[in-house]
Image: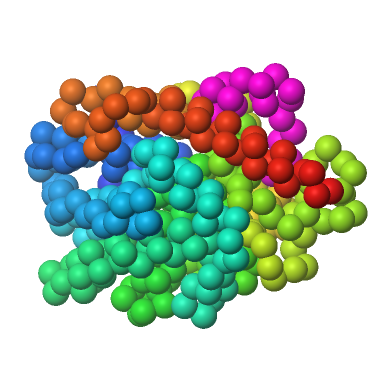
Amino acid sequence: MMMWNPGVFAIFDSNDLIYNSTEARGLWDLSNAAYYTFNSSCVGSTFYEPDQSIFLHSFDAECDSKNNKCGGFISVSNKNKQLFVSYRGTDVITQLMAEISDTLTAPVIFYGVGTTGKYFKDAHDVTWDFVRKVLEMTEYIDYDVVFTGHSLGGAMASLGATRTLLLGLRKSNQIKLVTFGQPRTGNKDYASYVNKNIPYAFRVVNTKDIIPKVPFCTANVKTFFKKQMDCDSTVDYGYFHHKNEIWYPTSMVNESAYKICDGFPLGEDPSCSQGVVYKLTDLINSNALLFDHRRYFNSQVLSSNILCSPITEGSSTADKISIFFKIFKKIKAFLKSFF
């Protein structure tokens, strides 16, 4: 059962720019909860202080030509004057295929602050009004806003936080952004905007999670023949991560050690997850490789929770991710044929 971790509310301060692993564990529960259909019992099992935390509403909208839906939910802590926007990650294979297809097309401009993937922007655009309306409600107008999400949900959280700031709905010190297994979301210009304007932004990455490695960045030609491909920070095209990566290099069980990745280039520190070299056995066993993507803080996406019902019935998330990686390997092999 997912539980909001003790102490989170007491230490939650939008002016505190230090990564807090206790807070992150609680936000992971919210990101994980976005995969479920909600009711009052489910909210009570997710929040540590259910009497102080209220589930406002979930939101969904078709976000691609296959009629797949993107969405999440919004909750509030009136005691602490905070809104939480939690975005759902990919949950069906047709959605994965649509994401991959759109990723291979040219990026699109994201409201004047750089480019992002077409699928990411479409997902943001069709769900934005649900979020905006809550942010503009009189009773919440002075509440801080926390954006969180896993995988695709992490990209949507990043875009949601950025759009909130662009429209002046909140100031920089009223926004928190904490994501898990977030793919690269925009180009260098987009990353630079987030770096400069959203001080509290953390991308949590578990060990060998491969999803933060895609879409591919533009590799520095000087490192082309190395096992590790450094991302080129001098180009504006391609994809590039924004700050701050928090990398758990060995595990995320209990009080596992983590590294704050602030090396050059910022967002693509080669001493953190970007520098992970996958073994042949990793590539052969796709389930083992993506184990780290679907499990954070020792809690698996769509793990059993008797008070919450998974949004998507049918095959398990593990099966869907395994299928995704098989597709990913084919695309990678195709791209390698050109080099």
Q: Is residue 12 left or right of residue 200?
A: left
Whether residue 26 is situated above or below residue 13 in the rendered picture: above
Q: In the image, which residues are magenta?
A: 271-292
Q: Is residue 176 magenta?
A: no
Number of labelled discs? 0
Q: Can I make out residue 12 in this image?
A: no
Q: Residue at x 30, y 39 (%)?
A: 35
Q: Residue at x 51, y 35 (%)?
A: 324
| Residue 34, quarter of picture | top left
Whether residue 283 is situated above or below residue 171 in the rendered picture: above
Q: Is residue 37 left or right of residue 297?
A: left
In the image, 161 versus 232, the foreground residue is 232
Q: Can I make out residue 122 in this image?
A: yes
In the image, 24 versus 126, the foreground residue is 126
What's the coloring here?
Answer: rainbow
Whole-percent x, y for residue 321 in the image = 48, 32
Q: Is residue 273 magenta?
A: yes
| Residue 311, quarter of picture | top left
Point out the image quarter for the N terminus: top left
Q: Residue at x 77, y 43 (%)?
A: 336
Whether residue 91 is situated above or below residue 202 in the rendered picture: above
Whole-percent x, y for residue 256 in the image = 53, 27
Q: Residue at x 84, y 48 (%)?
A: 339
Whole-percent x, y for residue 201 in the image = 49, 57
Q: Is residue 317 left or right of residue 74?
A: right
Main secondary structure along the magenta-highlighted residues: helix
In the image, 45 versus 199, the foreground residue is 45
Whole-percent x, y for residue 149 in the image = 39, 48
